[in-house]
Image (cartoon, helix red, strand yellow):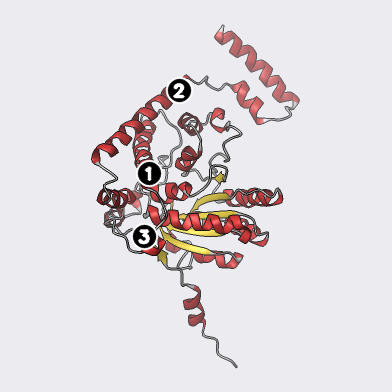
Amino acid sequence: MSQIDFDAILAAENKFPELQVLDESGQVTDQDLMPDLSDEQLIELMSQMVWTRTLDTQATKLNRQGRLGFYAPTAGEEASQLASNYAMNQDDFLLPGYRDVPQLLHHGLTLTQSFLWSRGHVTGNHYSTELQALPPQIIIGAQYVQAAGVALGIKKNKGTQVAYAYTGDGGTSQGDFYEGINFAGAFQAPAIFVVQNNGFAISVPRAKQTAAPTLAQKAVAAGIPGVQVDGMDALAVYSVMKAAREFTAAGHGPVLIETMTYRYGAHTLSGDDPRRYRTEELDEIWHKRDPLTRMRHYLTAKDLWTEAKENEVVEQAKADVKAAVTEADATPKQTVTSFLANTYAVQPQNIQQQIAEYQTKEAAHNG
């Protein structure tokens, strides 16, 4: 009987190196992967990251004050989120998960709408026709199936756009993940699938989700390219995403990108306590890899960034949050009748009766 060396097969299949441009101190480690970004673009990308880190701090405070509803912290993932989004075109179609509000904001969503969405207000889902995006997906991994469909629609219409979707490492354990990348691969649809591997699906470590050494290699089963990149390195993430967009837009089919990142906060602010499943030692390791610190060192050395500039961005973010909260507070509150009307495209008789009943009560109350 012939002998098959399964260990050798596994070793060959597991070769997915983690690409990097900047190390923890902001030093260039791979000049060949350095993106072609102007000084102005580098400053803009860093400004987006600082603005978003400040937003995360302010949003956490608002949540604790009861002025914001559902919120998934983003601190630590700024390079993964914003550098990847920065590499895309404005008319590309974004399909985010619930932690990916920062990409939506920098793709055209207003901050006020994001706050209303967090509060569960229907207005938070009323996107303009110019905004090429869907609201954040709550169902884990479902946006991958949607992305495959949007990408196929783009291809059928002979469009030049690309659909791009995000999920976390836990999302790769969902059936929708495989269905999405397989469907897009089979039809060579222009889609980019980003897996933000922050090490934990809520409290479940990535090592307990799959035996695969990397998540990037899951692309192999769908017959599409898979790449792993240092998700705390904004320049590496941008380079990989930009190359993926060029590849996909040229008609070569989808790409899967795994960004190695970390969320400093809880999974969401709805009861999760990361201290129950993460150690201080692990947190310290990842804080040393902070994407803002890395870019700060790199840009400061190039005389492109100063403490004064950073403070200016921070103060602007705080002002933006204050103005958005004020506007969200002034938005008319939802009513029982509006909930019922929005739920049914064609209202059955009992719902029509309830709407009429509540309209009478609301009119009397407003009286």
Question: Which element type, helix, strand or loop, lies under badge 3?
Answer: loop
* Horizontal side of residue 82 vs 162, given as left or right: left
Residue at the (65%, 30%) spot, across then down: 343
* Horizontal side of residue 28 vs 213, given as left or right: left
Q: Quick check: 247 above or below 41?
A: below
- Tell which residue pokes out farthest to the top in this image: 367
Question: Which element type, helix, strand or loop, lies under badge 2?
Answer: helix
The C terminus - image quarter: top right
Determine which of the numbered discs, if any, sits on residue 40 in the image: 1
Label 1 environment density (alpha carbons within 10 Å; few <14, some 14–19, many ≥20): few
Q: Nearer the viewer, residue 351 or 159?
A: 159
Determine which of the numbered discs, if any, sits on residue 21 in the image: 3
Residue 198 visible, this angle: yes
Q: Give residue 266's position: percent from left, percent from top.
A: 38, 45
Dot 1 or dot 2: first in sequence order is 1
Q: Give residue 302's position: percent from left, percent from top.
A: 28, 50
**What's under tag 2, amino acid-wise?**
Glu
CB atoms of marks 1 and 2 within 8 Å:
no
Q: Which residue is mark 2?
A: 327
**What's under tag 3, amino acid-wise?**
Val
* Horizontal side of residue 250 vs 108, given as left or right: right
Q: Give residue 102's position: percent from left, percent from top.
A: 45, 41
Q: Quick check: 268 above or below 229?
A: above
The N terminus - image quarter: bottom right
Residue at the (34%, 31%) spot, across then down: 316
Dot 3 or dot 1: first in sequence order is 3
Determine which of the numbered discs, if any, sits on residue 316 in the image: none
Number of marks drawn: 3
Residue at the (27%, 36%) spot, across then down: 311
Q: CA distance from mark 1 to mark 2?
A: 31 Å
